[in-house]
Image (cartoon, grey):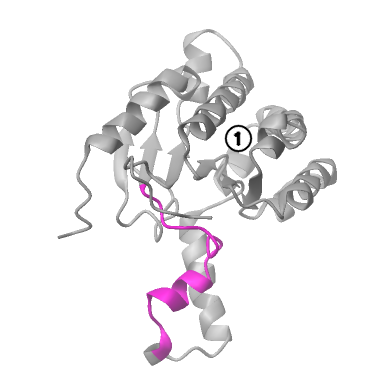
Amino acid sequence: MITDNENNLPIHVAIVPDGNRRWAKERGLNPWQGHEAGAQNTEKLLRKALAMGIQCVSLWGSSVENLTKRPLLEKKELLRIYEEYFLKLINSADIHDNEVKINFIGKWEEQFPESLKKIMRNGLEATKHYSKHVLNFFLAYSGDDEMLEAVKAMVQDGISAQAVNKETLKKYLMTKDLPTVDYLIRTGGEPHLSAGFMMWDIANAQLFFSEKYYPDFNDEQFQLAIEDYQQRGRRHGK
């Protein structure tokens, strides 16, 4: 499925969709209304990514902290938005016509209600044989936690220090089946990384920081970001 291309498109684009709550606050709205606007924007960005021929897209939906430290009402509304959005996504012609495999990565099985998990499992089952495109949602996810869990698992499996290399570590990550990230886009005007998001997989990624809050980072903004990537040289440390 993953192939090089002649147009210097990134194969794997990861998005940190920051700024939903600030977008809502500036408009006098409730925080979850910002999340809802972000979900609606995600639909536009995914259609644009498909139209542009990007093969793998990852979105960080929520960290463990987002689900445990936010006010109860906001968490409840966020889970409602997930239910509505994922149900719509799984039944979308865009997913099935383009043969998009959906992955949910993180500890969502431990954090989400059964009604939401049922929808997500149905999505995994319905798209598991697709291979033209991949769409990953990171939910109840922490990159720091992912790395610690990988190291613990290697120790428990008796992997010797001499046997540990890049390939070994990758096999123990939640992202073991994903290609490394070529391009990381973060919205919201704060140019930094958070909670070790995909720390192993973004080691050589190009970075793009947008001043736009995520609901305002529309398909046109996304295309400009991809065009910026296409104009950059990839040296991979050379």
The answer to which of 65 and 238 lies nearer the viewer is: 238
Secondary-structure class at tag 1: loop
Bounds of the magenta segment: 163-182
Residue lying at 53% horizontally and 55% vertically, measured from the top left:
1
Query: Residue 225: percent from the left, percent from the top?
Result: 34, 29
Residue type, mark 1 in image: Arg
Q: Is residue 172 magenta?
A: yes
Residue 25 visible in rendering: yes
The answer to which of 183 and 32 lies nearer the viewer is: 183
Quick check: 63 above or below 128? above
Quarter of the view holding residue 97: top right
Residue lying at 75% horizontally and 45% vertically, measured from the top left:
123
Query: Residue 231: percent from the left, percent from the top?
Result: 23, 35
Quarter of the view holding residue 106: bottom right
The rendered magenta stretch, by its main secondary structure, is classed as loop
94 horizontally vs 173: left or right: right
Number of callouts in the render?
A: 1
202 horizontally vs 137: left or right: left
The answer to which of 103 and 67 lies nearer the viewer is: 103
The answer to which of 133 and 151 lies nearer the viewer is: 133
Residue at the far top in the pictured view: 27
Quadrant into which the C terminus falls? bottom left
Residue lying at 66% horizontally and 43% vertically, measured from the top left:
99
Quick check: 144 above or below 162? above
Q: Is residue 162 magenta?
A: no
Which residue does the numbered mark 1 point to in the structure image? 70
Residue 218 visible in rendering: no
Crowding at mark 1 (Cα within 10 Å: few <14, some 14-19, many 20+): few
Query: Residue 49: percent from the left, percent from the top?
Result: 49, 33
Query: Residue 224: percent from the left, percent from the top?
Result: 34, 24
